[in-house]
Amino acid sequence: MSLNQLFEAAKDAMGKCYAPYSKFPVGAAIRAEDGVIYKGANIENLAFPQGWCAECTAIGAMVMGGAKKIVEIAVIAEKMALCPPCGGCRQKIAEFADRDTRIYLCDETGVRKTMTMDELLPFSFDTDVIG
Ligand code: THU
């Protein structure tokens, strides 16, 4: 499974976005522990707060596909060279990731920046310390 496949999946997902209000298409692709690539795009709503992010759609697809672990995730936005996942998405990704899970920020030509979960969401809420 190549990194390029993950990038292409994120790009393909972006093409399926529903973003008539922001006109800011975003795509995400997750390679899960089952080896499957799960895709998602942002889906907006006339009642603006009801819309949700591409990462969120991809996580939903992954869980409904029966997987529970993000091995790596690629994110792409048509109008931004590097689209860092929003704060809420960082927390949502973290739920299914490890500290060293890789997040690939892409532009239309491919992966431009690779970050770990720990870099993206440092000092995160971690229930391990609760015991
Ligand atoms: N968006 C995402 O899909 N992912 C992010 O991490 C950042 C923002 C979407 C939400 C909204 O549809 C549009 O980008 C503009 O904020």
Image (cartoon, rainbow, N blue to C red):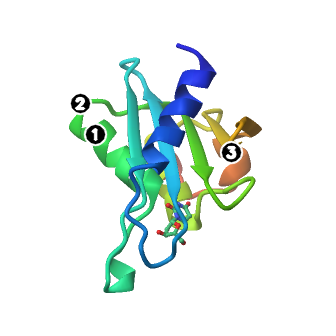
Q: Amino acid at mark 1?
A: Val
Q: Residue beneath label 1, please? A: 63
Outermost residue on the top side: it is 1
Do labels 1 and 2 touch, CB within 8 Å? yes
Q: CA distance from mark 1 to mark 2?
A: 5 Å
Left or right side of 87 for 47:
left
Q: Nearer the viewer, mark 2 or mark 3?
A: 2
Residue 131: tell me if it is visible.
no
Q: Residue beneath label 3, please? A: 118
* Residue at disc 2, secondary structure: loop
Q: Residues within 10 Å of mark 1 (few under 14, many from 20)?
A: some
Q: Nearer the viewer, mark 1 or mark 3?
A: 1
Q: CA distance from mark 2 to mark 3?
A: 25 Å
Q: Amino acid at mark 3?
A: Asp
Q: Residue at x 41, y 17 (%)?
A: 35
* Residue at disc 3, secondary structure: helix
Question: Which numbered disc flags the more N-terminal residue, 2 or 3?
Answer: 2
Front residue (pair 116, 62): 62
Residue 119: tell me if it is visible.
yes
Q: Is mark 2 within 8 Å of ligand 1?
A: no
Question: Which numbered disc flags the more N-terminal residue, 1 or 3?
Answer: 1
Q: Is residue 11 above or below residue 88?
A: above
* Image location (x, y in percent) of residue 126: 53, 52
Q: Amino acid at mark 2?
A: Gly
Q: Residue beneath label 2, please? A: 66
Q: Residue at x 37, y 71 (%)?
A: 44
